[in-house]
Amino acid sequence: MFSPQLTSATHQACYPIDNNAHILSEIYQSNAALACYCCPANWALSQAAKKVATAQTGEILRYQGKVDNDLAKQIDELFQTSTHGNLITNHVMLMLDMFNTLFEPKEIGLRILSCDHAHSPAFHQNQMIVRMASTLGGTGEQWITHQDATFLPMQATDTRHRIKQPEPAVINHFCEGDIAVYKGTNWIDQEVHALISASPEFKGHDPRLCIYIDFLA
């Protein structure tokens, strides 16, 4: 059973990335902020996602509960009428299978969004325990290393530290199809290694599907 209670880490944060899915287990390293499985989306999957994202804006699915056959059926029904929609279903189910294997959750939060603009454009430390993310139809979330982050002094109205907009040269992003898992400040004893990220970068009307799975219990 997943238990995000690791010993306090003082080591510099690391960011394991590889084209082998086994890399995702590196999230359990005490100083890992993220682990990313590089698996570029093929043309058919990318086009299928663009078509769905163009036809439907906003939240396509919000789910809270366990990973089971009913959820799989719900996801399949979402995309079964779209051209190559089965490829989207397969990608989401792969993510759920990986997440389930990594953390054995009793309860997850799943969101599938059609995005054509940045919902969280400012760089910030994520507040959840741990999240898996993937983007189809375009590049994924932007992120920076902790070494490249400049925290601004807190103001009276701030609820968390603001981060100065980083220089473009130090901004990374997940590629289309990548499956990344990253820590938030609620991973006990790992607060300092919560990933610093921002929404994907959008240029003009560039809709894509953003998929997020959160560990809830």
Image (cartoon, rainbow, N blue to C red):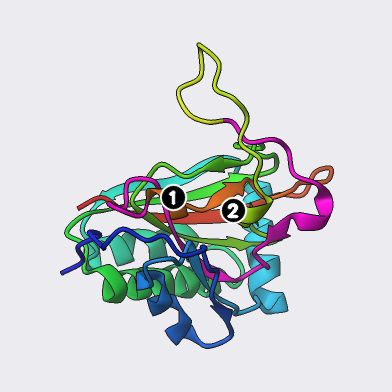
- Residue type of the residue flagged with mark 2: His
**In the rendered picture of this protein, how many numbered marks are placed on residues?**
2
Q: Residue furthest top?
A: 156
Where is residue 216 shown, x and y percent of the image? Answer: 25, 50
- Residue at the (54%, 22%) spot, across then down: 154
Q: CA distance from mark 2 to mark 1?
A: 9 Å
Where is residue 150 shown, x and y percent of the image? Answer: 66, 40
123 left or right of 167 in image: left
Up the image or down, 2 lies above or below 112; here it is below
Q: Which residue is mark 2?
A: 146
Nearest the viewer among 201 and 30 is 30
- Residue type of the residue flagged with mark 1: Val
Number of other residues with Cα within 10 Å of mark 1, as a class: few under 14, some 14 to 19, many 20 or more: many
Task: Report whether residue 141 is seen.
Answer: no
163 left or right of 24 in image: right
Number of other residues with Cα within 10 Å of mark 2, as a class: few under 14, some 14 to 19, many 20 or more: some
Answer with the quarter of the image where residue 124 lies. Answer: top right
Span of residues in magenta: 162-190
- Residue at the (70%, 43%) spot, across then down: 116
Please identify the dominant SS of the magenta region: loop
Where is residue 162 shown, x and y percent of the image? Answer: 59, 31
**Magenta region includes residue 205:** no
For the residue labelled by badge 2, is the local secondary structure a helix, a strand or a loop?
A: helix
Answer with the quarter of the image where residue 50 lies. Answer: bottom right
Nearest the viewer among 165 and 40 is 165
Q: Which is more N-terminal, label 1 or label 2?
A: 2
Q: Which residue is mark 1?
A: 192
73 left or right of 68 in image: right
Where is residue 19 shown, x and y percent of the image? Answer: 58, 85
Up the image or down, 39 lies above or below 35; here it is below
- Residue at the (37%, 56%) spot, across then down: 130
Find out whether the residues at labels 2 and 1 contact each other: C-beta distance under 8 Å.
Answer: yes
